[in-house]
Structures are given as structure tokens and as C-alpha cells.
Image (cartoon, rainbow, N blue to C red):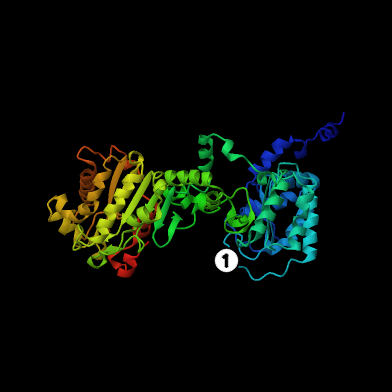
Amino acid sequence: MDVSQNTQRHARSFLDLPSKIRQRIYKTADLVVGKTLRLAPRNIDDDFSESQPSPESLDFTYSLLQTCKTINDEVMTLICSQNILVVVHEHVRYGLEFLRRLSPEQCSALTNLFVQLHLKASPVDDSQLLPPPDPLHPALVASWQTTARHILSHTKPGTLNLGLFCDTGVSDTTFSVLQPLRDFSGFLRNCEIQLHHQKENTRAHAIAREACIRARGFDPNLRDRPFRFFDLPTEVRRHILEYTGLVTPYKEVYWTADRGFRAAAALARCGGKDCDEYLHRGCRFLGCTQPYSAVTGYICCQRRSGYSSHCQCWEAARSLLLVNRSLYREALQVLYSCNRIIVIPSKGFRSCLRPVDTATRLDASKFITRHMWPDVLHNLRTLEFVFPAIDPATLISGEPYYLDFCHAIDHLKAHTDISKLTIIVNITLAGSVTRGDQNWIRDELVKSEGNEAFALRIHAQLLDHLKTLRCMKRFFVHLEWAWHWFLIDHPRVGLPHNCLDREMNKMESWLENMVMGDDYDSEAAGKGNEQPSIWLYKIWSTLEHVWWPDIPKRQLLNYV
């Protein structure tokens, strides 16, 4: 017997290995998987190199695809199933042609596909307008329809996530673009559609929503049917309302006499992994920050005309207040009991009350007596007053604004469930605003020799009438000053940070005990566990690298 012929007859090739073993070898050898792939010609420079695979990985994958048809089909199927494919707006025709060349098996393996068919602005930043595009040509619409039907006719139901960007608004072109999704309803796992880069009108949102829901196999009219909400138990209704826009992202609501209510917002857009840990808890409700958004773009229902089930952006639930009187009352209960209501000065967080302002009503007084109905006050659970800085030369007792504040506190006592109410008072020390804190610490702390009554004589007069609310659940005082945000020793003052903190804590405790009684312990009541309000935290974060005295006085007094 010829040994060479026997060896040749039993020779093994790479394709004789099990499919799962071959896939593991591909991945180990640096096949492109788990990446976001922009479908563009190879000779095109890619501006998104940070999100793309390495050149070595791309070269290996390209070489592997040239090996043979069997390996090409197998590798291409793996690429389609384990990567996000993006048809970028600069190379739409190339991307659509690439998708049309996919085999039925490769189409069925697709899991994530984004198509930027027609864009007027950056899919990541809607304020960054692109060069005015030509109208969407009928030939391109037909190319998209052919491509979409090819993919959807072979995709596995409930497998593919599709994102479609087509800034054509409400038009016949839009309906033509969406027609393939109507023809293959129930095939997609998830669908997101953008029809305009701005929040143009509600009809565009409705069109996108209907197309997305039909593409997933659901009835788009299901939510439009009447539902007997008040047949549910009271506890269940309240629990449902707590998941609506009645509860803000940070559970804080600001109020000023000139602007009314507004929700607390972060200082800037989410920074992803680099985002501030404390502020990050509300980011997902204030802006869409999906993974790979720098390449794929994102579809935000609140910023753009479209629909996305991933969008969790917060929107004020004004419509709930307009249904009927019963729902209005229950909605107000959730609004005022689940959020911290923060009354801030109309002139800004760093405004100052001087002797010439004694006829001015405090915003706290306006909120209690002018804005809030008596039966609504009963729902308050956490109320925070941000008082303006008070010039030490300003008299308190007998002044119109003080008497008005006393009347407001009496009104609050008469109509609020005091035993469930927490009041937080923030006072900015006047010296830290008017003199940049250069002299105030030495004058008021060092020279007072620990006499809190002298150092806080103005603030004690302002808070004196709060003694009538002594049976409230909790009462906290926060004294804010220019160097509170600074984390090292204070070179201009001559006192280390921890010494000043101890002095400030003693003064805060003195004011709290003055109102609540000598036996009251704010730390035992949970003051240490209370997170700072977003407005205050933003000031600390912003000023962390700013030299306070160098800020212009006008900017300082009106800083928000």
C-alpha cells in the first residue's frame, strides 16, 4: 500500500474543524468583533478612529475574507452578528450596496444596524448643522426600499435592532422610506426612527412612533384606548404616577417669583465614564447617552422629531394636571411629596439683601402666600429656602419683608402637615459675597471668640419665627461661604480647612437648636446623609478651579 496516498486521502484541513472552534480561532486571531463598523470604502480616511477597530484587525479581517468563499461566508456572518453596522450619511450608496450583497444567512445574523439615510445635522450634536443636503433623490429612496426589503425578508423575527435617520419631516418621501417597515411588521426586535434633527412637530413623532411599534409587531393604537385609571387602588395609582414626569431626574424643583417652576438640571451633558459620579445619577433622564452614540448617533424624543424606546429623557407631565380635578389632586400630591421644593432668590443664588431692599418681599414669602393654595401646602414634604446674603448693617425686626416672612410662616403652619415636613435653610454669608471672604472669617469667627449669637445675630433674627414650627419633622441649616468648595487650607485666612468646618458646624447647630430646642440633634436626624442640592453642588464644581476674588463683582452677585 502506498503510504503517501493513504496520508493524502486522510489529510485534514482547517474547514474540518467544528464551526465553534473555527469561530474561536478567528476571534483569537483578532477578527473584528464587538465593534462599530462604518460602512465606507477602504481608501476613505475615518474620523472616528477611536471607535473603529485597529488597522491590524481590519487588515487581518480583510485578508481572511479573501481566503475562500466558504471562509468568506462564515466570517461575514460572524461580522454581521457580533458588530454594529452603520451606513454613514457620507457614503449612503456604498453602505446600501454592501447590505444588498449580504446573503440570506448573513441577513438573518444581523443584530444591530444604523442607517443615516438623510441628515441635516450631526447625528450626535443637533446644533452642529451639516452642509445643506440635496433633496432625497427618488433613486436613493428606491435603493433603500430594495435594501430594506432584502434584509427584512431574511432576518429572524425579534433579532435585529434598526436605527433609521431620515430628516425629511412629514412628507410623501417619508412615507415611501417607511413603507418597507410597514410591509414587514413584527420582524424587528427594536426600531428607532428620526424624521427631523429638531423637535419639529408632534405629527412627525406620531408617524415615527407608529412605524416603530408596527415594525416590532405591536398595535400602535393600543395606548390610545380608554383606560379606567381610577378603578385601580389608590396605592397603585400613586405608584404609577411616581414613574411619570411628576418626579424630576434629581427629585428637585426650583421656584422663583419671576420664572415659576423648573426642574434641576446638570451643569453639562453627560461625560460618560468621566461624568461626575454625583451628577451622573440623573444623566439618563436629561439626555440620550447610548453606547457608541459618537458613531451611530442617537435618537432623542425630547430633542428631535422621532421615536426611540431607549429614550428616557424627562418631560414635565403637564398633561396629567389637565385631565380632571381628581387626577390633578393626586398628581400634585406626587409632585410636592416626591420632590424637594427649592425656593431661590429671583436675583440669583449670590444676591445680597441690603438696607435699601427692606421693602422687598422675600421669594420664600411669595411662594407660601401668593403661589401655593392652602390645600396644596399640605402635600409638601421637603421645603428648602435659599435666602439671599444679608448685609450685617441691615435691620431685621420690624422691617416689612421680615413681618411678611413671619406671616408666611404662620400661613405655612396653618395649612401644612408640620409633623411630616422637613425644612432646609441655606444662607450665604454676606462677607463671603461682598468681600470675597478676605476679612469676614477673621472678623466674625476669630474676633467673636466662639460667640455664635454675635456672629449670627442677623441670621438668628431672620429665623427666629421658625420656632413656631418646632414640631416639624426635621430642620437643617447650611451656611455657605466663599471657600466652602475649596479642598485645601486657606492661605489668605490663616485657618486650616478642618478648623473652619468645625466652626461652621457649631454655628449651624446653634441656629438649629435655637429653632428646634436644645435637645435637637440634626446629625441624628440625618443631616449628614443629606446630599447637597444640585444648585449648590454645581457652584462647588464650577468654582473648584476658580480664584474667588478674581470673579467680577457683577458676575459674583448674580451667579447661578
Q: Nearer the viewer, residue 242 or 467?
A: 467
Query: The residue tagged with tag 1: helix, strand or loop?
Result: loop
Q: Quadrant of residue 429?
A: bottom left
Quadrant (top left, top right, bottom left, bottom right) of the N terminus: top right
Is 72 on the left or on the right of 276, as rendered? right
The part of the image, by quadrant, that contains residue 257 is bottom left
> Quick check: can you spot residue 55?
yes
Q: Is residue 536 visible?
A: no
Q: Residue at x 43, y 46 (%)?
A: 336
The residue to which callout 1 is attached is 128
* Residue nearer the viewer, 204 or 74: 204
| Residue shown at the point (51%, 39%) measured from the top left | 238
Residue 469 shown left or right of residue 370 in the figure = left
Q: Residue at x 15, y 51 (%)?
A: 453
Does 545 appear above or below 215?
A: below
Foreground residue, 195 or 510?
510
